[in-house]
Amino acid sequence: MKNYLTPELIKWVENSAADPIWQMGILASMKKDWYGVLRVSPIGLIHIHGNRDTGWAHIINRHAYYSNDFYFGEGALGNPSRFQSSGLPIFDWVPVADDLYRSGQIDTKEHADGELFVKYTGHSARFCASNGEMKDFILILYRGTKIVHSLYPKKNLQADTPGIKLKNLRRALDDLSAEKPFLSQWLTVRIPYYNSDITERYVIVVYIDLNADRGNAHLQVNWPNGQPYFSIYRLMEFFNFDLKIADVDTNNLEFTRFMNTFTKYGDFTHIEEVMGRTNQKLFEEG
């Protein structure tokens, strides 16, 4: 059940947005309730703080470049488009939404929850690093209102945005872990993959020799209930990490940068292909 604005909450939001204080150049309000007004744009679009299903929290969770949330489904449903990594949403997204509303291009195609929302399509170059180049965006408003439900680019705004390669599995970046026993030269990084039931089905386990500056990646295969089944060893080798033992022991900026780069943007295509074949062979074939 989606947690959208109810008719009663829509009236409350519209009454709050009608307060003259929003005409006094207020950038944004502090969050008190998820349905509270965050910002009223120069042309009167109402942005709410939102939750996972609607408003700014929804847009950030689903379409921000650095979002770690994972989604499942076909096409854009399971692989949502992303904004760029630069800029600030409060300065970028509000003018983009205004541009789309001004264009007046309403998408008349049938879509899910069409009785609740109106979908606008249009172009804008009013975002950081656009260099004046127009990009296509989608704006979705609550029907009959100026309240923003969602806003997103039709395609990723940044070329290096990580893509989704596995249909039924997602890399769970918020649950990864790294461990180095005291006085050891070995770092163990665990990168779990979840299915749509949020069950841990696979784990990429990387053992890194910090003295030799190299490592090996193995794949832990779990049963459908998440319990370990077996492992496939030495599926990938890595070299030249440029990571020092002192970086790990002190948990400094270099270690944080390594973890972000290696786990989120690391190319594990080969192992993910093994996951896909293993999943199909062992758990999907009748």
Image: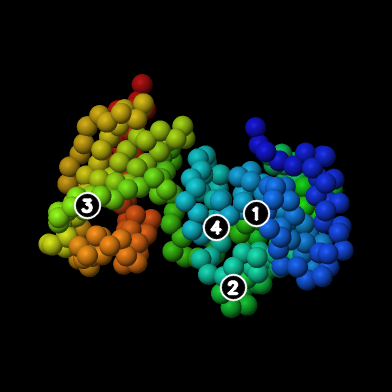
- Mark nearer the N terminus (1 vs 4): 1
Measure the C-alpha gap from mark 2 to mark 4.
Answer: 14 Å
Q: Quadrant of residue 83?
A: bottom right
- Mark nearer the N terminus (3 vs 1): 1
Q: Residue furthest top?
A: 286
Residue 73, above or below 251: above
Numbered badge on residue 56 = 1
- Mark nearer the N terminus (4 vs 3): 4
Numbered badge on residue 180 = 3
Q: Quadrant of residue 10?
A: top right
Label 4 or label 3, whichever lies nearer to me, is: 3
Label 1 or label 4, whichever lies nearer to me, is: 1
Q: Amino acid at mark 2?
A: Cys
Q: Amino acid at mark 1?
A: Trp
Residue ID for mark 4: 64
Secondary-structure class at tag 3: loop
Q: Amino acid at mark 4?
A: Ala
Secondary-structure class at tag 1: helix
Along the horizontal axis of the image, is 248 left or right of 20? left
Q: Quadrant of the N terminus?
A: top right
Closest to the observer: 56 or 95?
56
Residue in view at x 32 percent, y 38 percent: 202
Residue ID for mark 2: 128
Along the horizontal axis of the image, is 153 left or right of 139? left
